[in-house]
Amino acid sequence: MPNKTDGNTLFPIFLKLENLKLLLVGAGPVGLEKLEAIFNNSPKANVKIVAKVVIPEVLKIVKERNLLLEERAFQPTDLDNKNILILATNDIGLDEKIKKIATAKGIIVNVADKPELCDFYLSSIVKKGDLKIAISTNGKSPTIAKRIKESLNRAIPEDVNSLLQNMQKIRNKLVGDFEMKVNTLNKLTANWSTNEAISSVKNKV
C-alpha cells in the first residue's frame, strides 16, 4: 500500500493502439475529446464506438477514419475481444456497471472525469516529431498538466526531431557492445542544452 510520501505511483507506458482493440462508449462532447486525443497520438488506432446519441463532430471522425459505430445502448458483448475501454457516458451509474463487467474480463478502463474508477489516465502530451512527453498529475489537476504542456511546447525547439534523427544515425555508426555505445552517447550529450545538442550532432553525422 503506497504511503502519502510516495507521490505519483502511476506506471507510464506508450501503447501501440493499432495492435490493440479499443472500445469507446459515449459519443457526445466528452467522447469527442477522447477520440481526438486518441487519433492525435495514434492515427491508426483500432477503435469501435457504441453510443445512443452521436454528435455531428464524432460522426465526421467516424466517416473520415472509417470507424465502426453502433448507435444503441451498451451491451456486455461489446467487450468481447477488447483490450481497452473508455467510458464517456456522463452516467455514473452506468459507468460503474460497465466498469465492473470490464474488470472481470481483464480489460483496462478509463472513465471520463471519474479518477477513482480509472485503471489509467489520458495524459497531456507534448509532441515534437518522434519526441513525445506524457504529463501526469495523478488525476489531480488537468489544468496544471495543460500549463506544463504549454511551457514545454514553448521551451522545446521544433527542430529537436532533427537531433533525434541524427542521434540515431550516430548510434548506428558506433561499434562495440551495448554498454560501449551507451557510454559514448552519454559522453557526446553530457552538459548540453537542446540547441547546443542540435548543432553538435549535425557536425558529427
Image: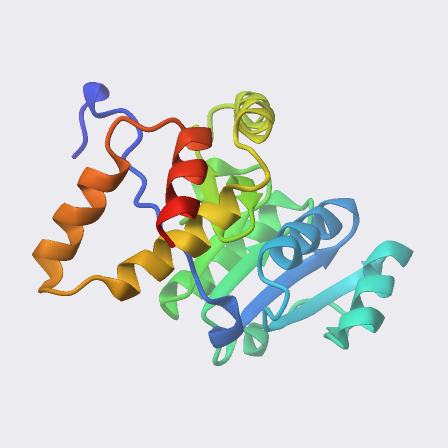
Would residue 77 be found to the left or right of residue 60 on screen?
A: left
Q: Would residue 71 be visible to someone looking at this image?
A: no
Q: How is the image coloured?
A: rainbow
Residue 7 vs residue 133, the one in the foreground: 133
Residue 96 vs residue 67, the one in the foreground: 67
Would residue 48 be found to the left or right of residue 18 on screen?
A: right
Q: Residue at x 24, y 41 (%)?
A: 188
Tell me: residue 172, above or below residue 27: below
Q: Quadrant of residue 11?
A: top left
Q: Position of residue 118 (x, y in %)?
A: 45, 46
Q: Quadrant of residue 67?
A: bottom right
Residue 139 vs residue 177, the one in the foreground: 177
Q: Residue at x 53, y 73 (%)?
A: 18
Q: Position of residue 4 (x, y in %)?
A: 22, 20
Q: Position of residue 137 (x, y in %)?
A: 43, 28
**The furthest residue to the right:** 56
Q: Would residue 186 be visible to someone looking at this image?
A: yes
Residue 80 vs residue 183, the one in the foreground: 183
Would residue 63 be found to the left or right of residue 126 on screen?
A: right
Tell me: residue 61, above or below residue 190: below
Q: Position of residue 88 (x, y in %)?
A: 65, 50
